[in-house]
């Protein structure tokens, strides 16, 4: 089941801010709201109902005042509530409160007023329907996790498959995310040097036999930006009608975490060690999406897993392109290779966007559009601290990375007002 969910960044609330509490329409006669400020370990945050999958409060209510609607939201029937406090005692998350009668968050019917009122970005409302509306088939990937614990590429291939649908052939190369043995979809294994060429041959065969199929490469950064870049560039130049998705985990993870051209500057890998003779990778990142956009790819976009509705929309656009190559550069954290906690993959994605380290944009018909505008970017340190591959960073390293991030963003913004030149 898919449920809308409230996300909270705990510890970021200023002590004197009560904007969310003030606008909450769920209040008891005594003024207690469905959301409240809480202090934990000298830092302020908020508490509200988690809308649990198996809510303990509902069966604990002796009068039946609590019920769960079709959207999974637990609501309070005030005419039945006696204020006995059984629900408050049973909730392990401090998400329901009693003041004469029980009060709790009900997401304001799907448009939480507290989210819009919060001036500090503490609250975010994730709506799953925006994503599942893009799905056209059931998940064809085998249950369980065939890859490393916390792998975001595994989530990505499930999303890609469900959005692009059954009439799709997948191509892969030697990599950590080789899904050929764990999916019901047809897959074709290639060499690292001939993925785009092989996809071209298959697509041309389908065209020759007057059949339609999505020809899709789900390829790592090593093959996309390094070893296999020449055939990818050639397919772009020829206008081949294929879809190339680069899942970028910024290194050769399958063979032992070696640096690739997309590894960030000064980052640790097994071949860019940290010590007296080395400070990590010495070169800046190779920014392939802009290279292919300038070369004339029909559609180019960046995407990541913290913004699945944006990713799904871009997959649908790529599927609709009929006049050339579509390229999606997917930011895809590798907790193992990035020395990060296995449950932080999506948070790393979100912070990459929120810090402008990885801007989300698309270029179509020679014009670049930002899909997510970050008006108040968070500090790069918020992103870097989640990964030990950056643990050695000093102020100079941080300043150099910030300059690269700022320069890339400035360059991209120029193409918003000045479309890519097109030769006659």
Image (cartoon, grey):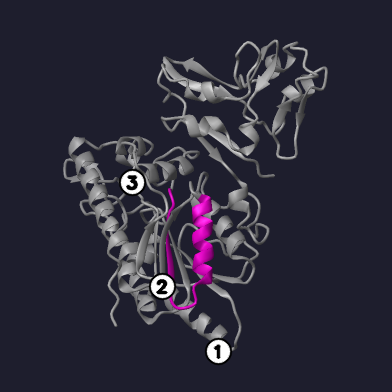
The first of marks 1 and 3 along the sequence is 1
Q: Residue 72, percent across and down? A: 71, 37
**Can you say whether 278 is above or below 297 in the image?**
above
Q: Which residue is mark 2?
A: 298
Q: Are marks 1 and 3 in contact (CB under 8 Å)?
A: no
The first of marks 1 and 2 along the sequence is 1
Could you say which disc has been placed on residue 208 in the image? 1
User: CA–CA distance between discs 1 and 2?
Assistant: 21 Å
Q: Residue at x 35, y 62 (%)?
A: 368
In-image side of 312 versus 370 (left or right): right
Could you say which disc has been placed on residue 312 in the image? none
Q: Residue at x 51, y 44 (%)?
A: 150
- Crowding around mark 3 (Cα neighbors within 10 Å: few <14, some 14 to 19, many 20+) is many
Q: Are marks 3 and 2 in contact (CB under 8 Å)?
A: no
**Can you say whether 74 is above or below 99 in the image?**
below
Task: Tell which tag, 1 or 3, sits nearer the viewer.
Answer: 3
């Amino acid at each position: 089941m898919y449920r809308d969910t409230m996300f909270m960044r705990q510890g970021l609330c200023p002590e004197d801010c009560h904007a969310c509490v003030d606008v909450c329409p769920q209040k008891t006669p005594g003024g207690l709201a469905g959301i409240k400020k809480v202090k934990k370990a000298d830092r302020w945050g908020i508490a509200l109902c988690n809308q649990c999958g198996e809510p303990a409060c509902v069966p604990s209510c002796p009068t039946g005042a609590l019920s769960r609607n079709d959207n999974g939201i637990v609501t309070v029937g005030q005419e039945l509530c006696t204020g006995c406090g059984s629900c408050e005692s049973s909730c392990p998350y401090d998400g329901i409160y009693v003041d004469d009668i029980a009060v709790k968050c009900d997401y304001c019917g799907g448009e939480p007023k507290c989210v819009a009122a919060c001036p500090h970005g503490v609250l975010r409302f994730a709506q799953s329907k925006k994503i599942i509306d893009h799905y056209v088939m059931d998940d064809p990937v085998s249950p369980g996790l065939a890859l490393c614990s916390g792998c975001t590429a595994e989530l990505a291939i499930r999303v890609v498959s469900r959005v692009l649908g059954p009439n799709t052939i997948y191509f892969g190369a030697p990599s950590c995310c080789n899904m050929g043995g764990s999916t019901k979809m047809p897959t074709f294994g290639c060499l690292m040097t001939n993925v785009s060429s092989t996809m071209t041959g298959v697509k041309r065969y389908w065209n020759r036999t007057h059949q339609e199929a999505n020809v899709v490469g789900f390829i790592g950064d090593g093959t996309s930006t390094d070893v296999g870049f020449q055939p990818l560039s050639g397919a772009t130049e020829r206008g081949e009608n294929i879809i190339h998705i680069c899942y970028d985990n910024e290194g050769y993870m399958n063979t032992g975490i070696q640096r690739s051209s997309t590894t960030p500057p000064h980052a640790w890998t097994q071949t860019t060690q940290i010590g007296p003779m080395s400070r990590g990778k010495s070169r800046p990142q190779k920014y392939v999406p802009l290279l292919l956009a300038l070369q004339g790819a029909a559609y180019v976009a960046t995407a990541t897993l913290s913004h699945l509705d944006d990713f799904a929309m871009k997959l649908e656009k790529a599927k609709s392109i009929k006049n050339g190559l579509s390229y999606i550069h997917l930011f895809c954290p590798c907790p193992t290779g990035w020395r990060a906690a296995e449950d932080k993959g999506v948070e790393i994605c979100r912070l990459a966007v929120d810090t402008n380290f990885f801007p989300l944009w698309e270029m179509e018909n020679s014009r670049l559009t930002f899909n997510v505008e970050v008006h108040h970017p968070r500090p790069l340190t918020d992103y870097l601290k989640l990964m030990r591959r950056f643990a050695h960073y000093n102020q100079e390293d941080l300043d150099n990375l910030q300059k690269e991030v700022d320069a890339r963003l400035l360059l991209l913004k120029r193409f918003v007002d000045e479309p890519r030149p097109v030769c006659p």
